[in-house]
Image (spheres, helix red, strand yellow):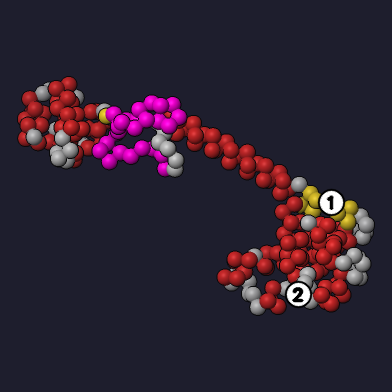
Amino acid sequence: MLEQAKRLRAEVDAVHALELIGVLRHLYWQQPRVHGRPLAEAADFHLNDMLAVIGPAPSGIFCADCGMELLRTSRSWKPPARYGPPLCPHCLSLEHDARSRKWQVESLRSRIVAEARVQARAMDWRAAAELVLAFPPLSQKISRGSAADQQEGVWHGWENARMIRNRLIAAAAAGDDSVGVAVDEAQLLVETALRVADWDTARTRDIVDPITHEPALALLTRLN
């Protein structure tokens, strides 16, 4: 069959001659024992060029959205659906665009929420921050950059508390003044403080009482 393809190529004026393309199409799609690359070379083609010229073939698989039959572009072709049912290129593009728009909306929403500010009394933020700073992760035998630090983020929580404490000091906010803290920073502060509040109840009381007489757990629960 390859010799026939060579002879036919020699007899026609151009590689795009209809009779040659018809034979190549039949051999490629209907004769799977004839390998594609040798067939393309016999007709003076590169494989990808031959595939572009002979065109696709029906696959017997239909798009799950629009019902159009999908076309095989090569013998190794697989339906273009990495996850879920098969989709035609047009519907796959629409799905990709929809996912992209959804991701952009969710990303924008997350950023807006993260930048929003939680209002609470300055003394509440100060008490939570001092509580975290009183129990540095070294007391848990966790060093910076260690596997435990990367998994639990304890040093990140400690540094976050220090940043908030320093910001409160710089602002010279009085105890009852309302102060806003960004949502992501506030959430991390409260989560970190809740983790350490029960380690040493006597020490926790000594830290929080000079700032506010409200029990630490009640304060943190309210902030949360």
Element carrying mark 2: loop
State the predominant SS element of the stretch in magenta: loop
Question: Residue 199 — which label?
Answer: 2
Q: Residue at x 38, y 37 (%)?
A: 80
Q: Which residue is mark 1?
A: 119
Q: Residue at x 23, y 28 (%)?
A: 54
Closer to the chain start, of discs 1 and 2, is: 1
Q: Position of residue 4 (x, y in %)?
A: 7, 31
Q: Badge 2: few (under 14), some or many (20 or more) residues near its Cα, within 10 Å? A: few
Q: Position of residue 169 (x, y in %)?
A: 85, 62
Q: Position of residue 44 (x, y in %)?
A: 15, 34
Assign the C terminus to one quadrant of the image.
Answer: bottom right
Position above or below: 213 against 73: below
| Amino acid bearing label 1 | Gln
Position above or below: 182 against 98: below
Position above or below: 92 against 83: above
Q: Quadrant of residue 34?
A: top left
Magenta stretch? 58-82
Q: Mark yes or no: residue 193 visible.
A: yes
Q: Nearer the viewer, residue 61 or 30?
A: 61
Assign the N terminus to one quadrant of the image.
Answer: top left
Left or right: residue 72 compared with residue 20: right
Element carrying mark 1: strand
Magenta-span inclusion, residue 215: no
Question: Residue 53 — which label?
Answer: none
**Mark 1 touches mark 2? (CB < 8 Å):** no
Q: Quadrant of residue 222?
A: bottom right
Circle nearer the viewer, 1 or 2? 2
Q: Quadrant of residue 37?
A: top left
Magenta-span inclusion, residue 77: yes
